[in-house]
Image (cartoon, rainbow, N blue to C red):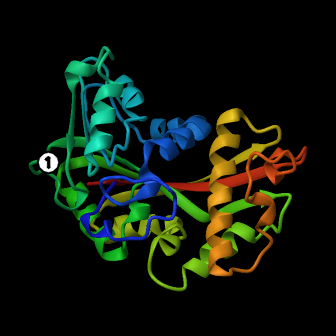
Amino acid sequence: MLTENQHSRENTWGYETSTGLAFTHEDIVDPHFEACAAYYLDALDSVGVRPGWHVLDAGCGSGAFLPRLAELVGPEGRVSALDLAEENAALAAERMRDHPARARLAVRQGSLLELPYADGTFDAVWCANTTQYLDDVELTRVLAELRRVTRPGGLVAVKDVDGTLSTVRPADPFLITDFFREGAQSPGYARQLLRGRDLYRRLRAAGFTSVRQRTILMEFHAPLSPAALRFYGNACARFARQATRAGMPGDWAPFLDPDDPAAPLRDPDGYISEGNVIAIGTA
């Protein structure tokens, strides 16, 4: 979805994408958005996007945020969207093909490491569920690019995962965080999932001012909605397979089959939580 140097990373999710980042496939990210839409849209609404603005969705994926962005900027505003994966850019454009705002929308393929826009093009940038795929060096470079393309006084908002708030019941309450911590012993995706609450420091270091940040706890109780059960059941099953192959500690066996009536998330006391962080700075 984001950076060219990740093509060679191991595909452990069972999907193929042009970027090699299987977790960015629409069959994963779209159910995730559907399950978390209320939380996600509340985060976007809190940024302060105003009517008439030109806003960039940086790392737009399949375009799930584009309808709300178009609504926020109104008929006098514009929305641009960019994603590294050609198929995601195509899906985002198709999503908005019949939308009333389609004439005010421009979707293109490109890299966040070298944004194809002039300095100061945008009044605001929205970057969601994207920085988790960047290592520390890439993140620094991308934040510099987001600042470059934002006008002085404009806003940059980065929303991403805080893996320290992930837990599931009935199960060991530390099962998922221990999974991330085990994976975080070496640089890579697992470590980056634990970096969410450092975003405000990263924005400050990149030269943004008036940085504000809040952490969002997203909770799902039984009976989970079909969207939440679909996404989190499959995600836990993938974690379980990875943990089992790697010989990680913990009782992952109950999560291997998300369709099993006895699966934890189908339990009358089933519960799962996920943390997100949104950091907003002024360019």
Dot 1 surroundings within 10 Å: few (below 14), some, or many (20 or more)? some
Q: Which amino acid does label 1 sit on?
A: Gly
Q: Which residue is drawn at 83% across and 53% down?
A: 264
Asked if residue 76 is positioned above or below residue 9 in the image, the reply reads above
Quadrant of the snapshot with the N terminus: bottom left
* The quadrant where residue 281 appears: bottom left
Instruction: Name the spot of residue 109 as percent of width and height, x first.
Output: 21, 45
Q: Is residue 197 left or right of residue 240?
A: left
Q: What element carries label 1?
A: loop
Q: Which residue is drawn at 42% across and 28% down?
A: 68
Asked if residue 186 is positioned above or below residue 282 in the image, the reply reads below
* The quadrant where residue 138 appears: bottom left
Instruction: Name the spot of residue 81 as percent of width and height, x first.
Output: 26, 39
Instruction: Name the spot of residue 251 as percent of width and height, x first.
Output: 80, 71
Relative depth, front residue between 239 and 125: 239
Residue positioned most to the left: 118
